[in-house]
Image: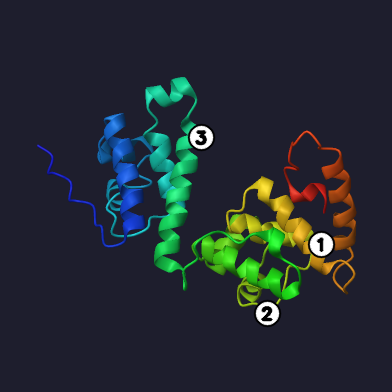
Amino acid sequence: MARPERPVDRTVPARAELADFLRGRRTAAGMTYRQMSSLVSGMPSRTTFERAASGSRVPDLETVEVYVRLTVTKEEEFTGSTDAAMDQARKLWIKARRATRAPYHLHKAPDPSLISNRADFSRALRDQHVWAGCPSPGEMSQASGAGMLPKTTAYRIIAGRTLPVTPVQALAFLKACYVQPPEEVEWLAAAVRVLVGSCEHPDWADAHARLHERVSKNRDGIPVRRLEAVA
């Protein structure tokens, strides 16, 4: 007979909320941690899955994503709500990271529409980094894609020592801070608003013109999906 699972560690409420979500999914799917691990050839291991749902720590995002994929129920498959479950898992994970790693507390994500100068832009990027749970420069470099955001560049932006040099570099930073495509356009608009006309890379001016053109062509509300389209 399997030993009972230990109660969720509720020292940090946001971590406990993520753990409750994961445990609820495993219960609904009717699976054991050993079965889950065997389906992925032991990577992650049974112990890793157990720890992810313990509430005592914030697991890797990759572990959470695998956990959710393995616990998809027939109802979710039938209703097509698997993506919604994954989105919820990521939101809870970011919230838990924010609660345990952020150096100061933010009540909401920064609003790029309020950016009016370079100092505002730098501060908003740093606040977005905190809102994302303070990923390390190494994590950000890996998440943004090979060569898109060097660790040293990420560190300098986080420290407030520099700003993204190009629109593509701005996208890389925002992607690493879990900013979704609809909001990327707002951030780029803020960036070109405060950088165009300065001595920044000329791509910013071109990005501004392309963004204006594409937004004008999307009056039906369809967002521009990627910054590469305007960079």
**Neighbourhood count class around disc 3 (C-alpha, 10 Å): few under 14, some 14–19, many 20 upward:** few
* Of the image marks 2 and 3, the number of the one nearer the N terminus: 3
Discs 1/3, front: 1
Task: Give the residue number, with chain letter if any, for mark 3.
Answer: 83
Q: Is residue 147 visible?
A: no
Q: Amino acid at mark 3?
A: Asp
Query: Which residue is at 78% across, 57% downward?
Result: 189
Q: Are marks 1 and 2 in contact (CB under 8 Å)?
A: no
Give the secondary structure at mark 3. Answer: helix
Q: Position of residue 71 (x, y in %)?
A: 36, 34
Discs 1/2, front: 1
Q: Position of residue 36 (x, y in %)?
A: 32, 37
Q: Are marks 1 and 3 in contact (CB under 8 Å)?
A: no
In the visual, does 11 lie left or right of 213?
Answer: left
Query: Which residue is at 30% across, 53% downward?
Result: 16
Q: Amino acid at mark 2?
A: Arg
Nearest to the observer: residue 186 or residue 9:
186
* Of the image marks 1 and 3, the number of the one nearer the N terminus: 3
Q: Position of residue 23 (x, y in %)?
A: 29, 42
Between the residue at mark 2 and the residue at mark 3, the CA separation in whole angstroms equals: 37 Å
Q: Position of residue 208 (x, y in %)?
A: 86, 56
Between the residue at mark 1 and the residue at mark 2, the CA separation in whole angstroms equals: 19 Å
In the visual, does 160 lie left or right of 52?
Answer: right
Task: Give the residue number, with chain letter if any, for mark 1.
Answer: 192
Q: Amino acid at mark 1?
A: Val
**Neighbourhood count class around disc 2 (C-alpha, 10 Å): few under 14, some 14–19, many 20 upward:** few
**Neighbourhood count class around disc 1 (C-alpha, 10 Å): few under 14, some 14–19, many 20 upward:** many
Nearest to the observer: residue 175 or residue 124:
124
Task: Give the residue number, with chain letter if any, for mark 2.
Answer: 161
* Quadrant in the picture for residue 95: bottom left
* Of the image marks 1 and 2, the number of the one nearer the N terminus: 2
